[in-house]
Image (cartoon, rainbow, N blue to C red):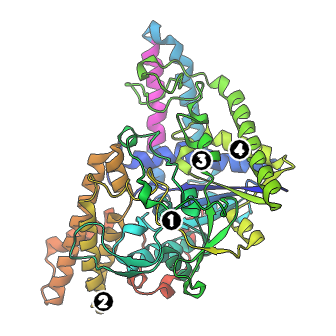
Amino acid sequence: MDGSLVLILHTHLPYVLRHGKWPHGSDWLCEAAAECYIPILNECNALMRDGITPNITLSISPVVLEQLADAEFPAIFNAYLDEKIEAAVSDRAYFADRPAEAGFLPLASYWRDWYADRSDDFNVRYGRNLVAAIADLAERGAIALQTCGATHGYFPLLGRDESISAQLGLAVATHRAHFGDAPRGVWMPECAYRPCYFWTPPVPTPYAPAMVRKGVEQLIAEHGLEYTVVDSHLTRGGRPLGIYASRFDAMRGMEGRGERFLPLDNTRSIHDLYRVCSTGDPDSGMTAIFTRDAGTTLQVWSGIYGYPGDPEYLEFHKKHHNSGHRYWRVTDSQIDLALKTEYRPELVDARIRTQAAHFVKTVEEEMLRFRAETGRAGTLAAPFDTELFGHWWFEGPRFLGEVIRLVAASRTIRMRTAPDELDDKDPGIVIQIPEGSWGEGGAHDVWLNPSTEWTWPMIYEVEARFHDLIAGRGSDPLENRILRQMAREHLLLQASDWQFLITTGSASDYATKRFREHYDNAMLLAGWADSLRRDMPLSLEQTNALAEMESINRLFPDLRLDHWITPESLVSPARPASRRSE
């Protein structure tokens, strides 16, 4: 073979259970489950039935795992599916009463049947347990699993290495709890990396000390994790090709500042694997990296230049006022929504086959070129947000299935999971890479800009308070209970989602509200812990408020405070109950 296609799907959403319903509460998670997770599971199982191993690497954030395994999720999801089915039935009556819109009647039936099928998938095929369904594929060798920062905290901007270490250690423990073993790889949230250097806080604050900080690769290695993913401009030191601006108008004017990037290093190829070590001393810790092929994968993720913008595909942005169902096709990605025309599902399969063939041919040609130039078999790493496939791009899961079928028949390339590719190539070249992310601009601009810089002093303040409280904690059960809940609020405060949603303008009010809630909760809990240390007991009202916080933000039931102290604390027992059908 001339090369490998390593497809990595990163699965993440913020913690939304018990934080509203629509448009940015639990419906957000239910949308992803119905439109992305179940269809991708279906594609993988169909491939296995046909004797084809998918060899997808599925990156799952711990916060998504905790929500899918939550005892309330099945009832919430079934209620969501019932609502979608009822809305399609209502649309049929609506269109039947309006002759000018009678052409939408077959599509209303399409959506009724589509959501009924997802209900059957969830309740019958997967036994109301998507975590178990994912585990089953992994156990059969169909896919490989990897983890992510516990709540998707943005590693380079967190104020203390203990925070990054806790994000990683808790991620490993959560993965082990749900799947029975530790992951080998980790997705750095937003593919954001920082090397070892004398770090100063990016905003004025008395709470984050300027000091020599470990490189993120060192912290990853301390938790037994072997590899991660970076964007191409980090490996090569060149200018980035961002991934977000085509989706969000608020980001279209953002550009990377040239002084942030090193000169392009033409001796490094994005189709080789490397190990990163920012200290110059491999004994200090290093991590293998897969590098995103931004040019090739542009075809897949761009709604303007890529396959999702095909005129026949379902238009994401236009929804019917009566139900929220989508009845229109892209038509033209540049025209006004009012000019969109009727979706024709019967025409999309031919487009999927054509585009999957084009993508596979593009990968084959790139790997043949690399082999001709170097004499080596290359690696084409294709990392994407899982939610692209099915949510942003409704036809995406079927595209993935067709790509995998075509690669299975290829004589040039093969599908490989990231762990298998790493074992095969075992990279020996150690490099240093600059700081950055896969966000628009290639640096931290999406998460640190005039609209979000107010969030970072608040994160640093909570980090400092929590650090001091942990350092002086005793054995009082109530105090430790308070600190455990403060840890959860602290982790949720760190989620990179809040800055992203504020910057893109897609859910700014919701993100601001959630951020302030977690900050207020954390600081309230810190005050209660201080009161206990002064022999001032909690009132009944305070005790009830603590119980309510624990009920609402109840992720990570196995959370241990020593995750903020030492990586050796990461081993936790499995929670097999989450892997069984209910």
Task: Give the quadrant of residue 538.
Answer: bottom left
Q: Nearer the viewer, mark 3 or mark 1?
A: 1
Indicate the amino acid at tag 1: Met
**Closer to the observer: label 3 or label 2?**
2
Residue toward you, 159 or 321: 159
Q: Position of residue 508 (x, y in %)?
A: 29, 47
Q: Which residues are magenta?
A: 80-96
Q: Nearer the viewer, mark 4 or mark 3?
A: 4
Q: Earlier in the sequence, mark 4 or mark 3?
A: 3
Q: Amino acid at mark 2?
A: Ala
Q: Residue at x 49, y 79 (%)?
A: 219
Q: Helix or strand or loop: what does disc 2 sit on?
A: helix
Q: Amino acid at mark 4?
A: Gly
Considering only order in the chain, which callout, 2 or 4, is on the residue closer to the N terminus? 4
Picture residue at 78% right of the left edge, 50% below the top: 369
Label 1 to label 2, Cα distance in Å?
A: 27 Å
Q: How far apart are labels 4 and 2 at the CA level? A: 50 Å
Contact, CB < 8 Å: mark 3 with mark 2? no
Q: Earlier in the sequence, mark 1 or mark 4?
A: 1
Q: Earlier in the sequence, mark 3 or mark 2?
A: 3
Q: Which residue is mark 4?
A: 401
Quadrant placement of the C terminus:
bottom right
Residue type at the position of mark 3: Ile
Q: CA distance from mark 3 to mark 2?
A: 44 Å
Label 3 SS: helix
Label ID, residue 188: 1
360 to the left or right of 497: right
Pointer 4: residues within 10 angstroms few (<14), some, or many (20+)?
Answer: many
- Residue depicted at 42% across the width and 74% down the height: 164
Disc 3 target residue: 38
Residue 2: in magenta span: no
Residue 471 — which label? 2
